[in-house]
Image (cartoon, rainbow, N blue to C red):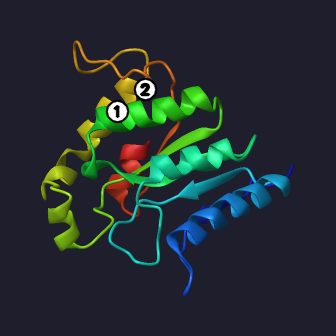
């Protein structure tokens, strides 16, 4: 049995290249990965980094999905404390509806940037404390039963987008389990 291989693409903007060059290279990498039997390409959320163009991860995944046919595409990951769970459910629910069986959602709790940019994003510095509850809320929006009465993700509800937890601690491992 072959080992499923994946690529983590940071949407690098090479020296002398434009943002457009970096994003177009992502399409070419994904097409090559698909042609060579890779299972998945992951894209990471980073902000305020001149050499990385993957800050709008869901938008990038949509573009790559429209330019490939079968390879799985995922966020590796969305920094959930930077966003509302409902918004992420709607974004990834849309992706999963447009590209069934191809979308994965990796989640992290770090800011994915420096403190000045955290403030510019209007992120609550304590938001990561709510990460476990936010993951459960997000799962509800992507599942069949919302955890917030009267609020449904459309699209999103019933898509059951696979969720992965990024982590390097016992906390992350326990949450993923």
Determine if residue 136 is in view.
no
Counting labels gives 2
Looking at the picture, does residue 15 appear above or below residue 77? below
Alpha carbons under labels 2 and 1: distance apart: 6 Å
Residue 177 x/y as whole percent: 44, 42
| Image location (x, y in percent) of residue 65 | 64, 44
Q: Label 2's element?
A: helix
Q: Is residue 43 left or right of residue 70?
A: left
Determine the residue positioned at 54% across, 73% down.
Answer: 12
Q: Determine if residue 166 is in view.
A: yes
Q: Position of residue 92 (x, y in %)?
A: 47, 36
Question: Which residue sits at x=14%, y=64%?
Answer: 119
Q: Quadrant of residue 99?
A: top right
Q: Are marks 2 and 1 in contact (CB under 8 Å)?
A: yes
Residue 101 marker: none
* Label 2 crowd bin: few (<14), some (14–19), many (20+), radius 10 Å: many
Residue 21 or residue 51, whichever sits in front: 21
Identify the residue at horizontal 65%, vertical 62% (top origin): 7
Residue 98 sits in which quadrant? top right
> Residue 55 is drawn in which quadrant?
bottom left
- Residue underneath mark 1: 138
Give the secondary structure at mark 1.
Answer: helix
Check disc 1: other Cα within 10 Å, few if <14, some if 14-19, many if 20+. many
Would you say 127 lies left or right of 52 here? left
Q: Residue furthest bottom?
A: 15
Pick the front one: 89 or 126: 89
> Front-most of 167 and 126?
126
Residue at coordinates 84% horizontally, 54% vertically from top-left? Answer: 35
Q: Which residue is mark 2?
A: 142
């Amino acid at each position: 049995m072959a080992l499923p291989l994946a690529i983590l693409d940071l949407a690098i903007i090479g020296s002398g290249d434009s943002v457009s060059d970096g994003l177009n290279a992502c399409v070419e990498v994904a097409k090559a990965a698909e042609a060579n039997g890779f299972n998945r390409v992951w894209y990471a959320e980073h902000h305020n980094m001149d050499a990385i163009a993957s800050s709008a991860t869901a938008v990038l995944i949509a573009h790559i999905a429209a330019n490939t046919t079968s390879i799985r595409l995922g966020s590796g990951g969305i920094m959930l404390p930077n966003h509302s769970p409902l918004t992420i459910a709607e974004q990834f629910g849309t992706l999963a509806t447009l590209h069934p069986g191809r979308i994965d959602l990796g989640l992290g709790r770090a800011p994915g940037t420096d403190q000045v940019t955290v403030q510019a994003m209007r992120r609550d510095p304590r938001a990561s404390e709510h990460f476990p509850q936010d993951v459960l809320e997000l799962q509800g929006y992507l599942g069949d039963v919302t955890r917030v009465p009267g609020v449904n993700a459309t699209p999103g509800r019933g898509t059951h987008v696979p969720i992965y937890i990024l982590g390097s601690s016992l906390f992350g491992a326990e949450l993923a389990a």
